[in-house]
Amino acid sequence: MKSQAISVSKAKKAIANYKKAIGRPDGMVELSIFYCEEAFGFLESCSIEDESYFVALVRMYERALEFVLSLPPTERANYLERLDKLRSRGRHVGWGVHDELNGLWYAATLDEHQ
C-alpha cells in the first residue's frame, strides 16, 4: 500500500453517485456504515494520523445515523448495532474521534426514535 493514494473523495463520490442513481434509504444506510467500517479498518491497520480523514469519518458516521433514523423503526436494529460497534472502535483512534461519535450518538436521542 506504500504507493497507493488515500482518497476519501472517491469513496464519498461513489456514495453520492448511488444516491443520484438509486438512492434507496436502506442502500444509503448500508453504504455509509460500510464506509465507516472500512475507514476504521484502514485506521487500525495503518495507524494513519490525518485530521481530514478523521473529520470525513465523523461526518459519514453522522450521515449514517441520519439515514438510519429515516428508516422505519422495525428496520433500524441491525444498523444501530453496527453503528454502536463503530462508536466503540473510536476509542482506539486519536483526535477526539470517540468523543465526537459519542456526541452524535447521544444527540440522535435514539431512544425517542425506537
Image (cartoon, helix red, strand yellow):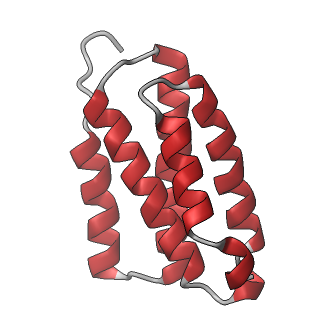
Residue 113 in which image quadrant? bottom right
State which quarter of the image contains the C terminus: bottom right
- Residue drawn at (33%, 76%) of the image: 19
- Residue drawn at (58%, 35%) of the image: 90
In the rendered view, would you say 41 is above or below 114? Answer: above
- Residue drawn at (60%, 24%) of the image: 92
Residue 74 on image: x %, y %: 77, 86
State which quarter of the image contains the N terminus: top left
Residue 96 on image: x %, y %: 46, 33
- Residue drawn at (57%, 70%) of the image: 108
Residue 73 on image: x %, y %: 72, 86
In the rendered view, would you say 9 is above or below 109? Answer: above
Left or right of 38, for residue 14: left
Residue 4 on image: x %, y %: 26, 20
Left or right of 31, for residue 112: right
In the rendered view, would you say 107 is above or below 21? Answer: above
Residue 21 in which image quadrant? bottom left
Task: Residue at the far top: name it.
Answer: 2
In the rendered view, would you say 100 is above or below 23? Answer: above
Badge count: 0
Left or right of 103, for residue 58: left
Which residue is more in the foreground, 17 or 35? 35
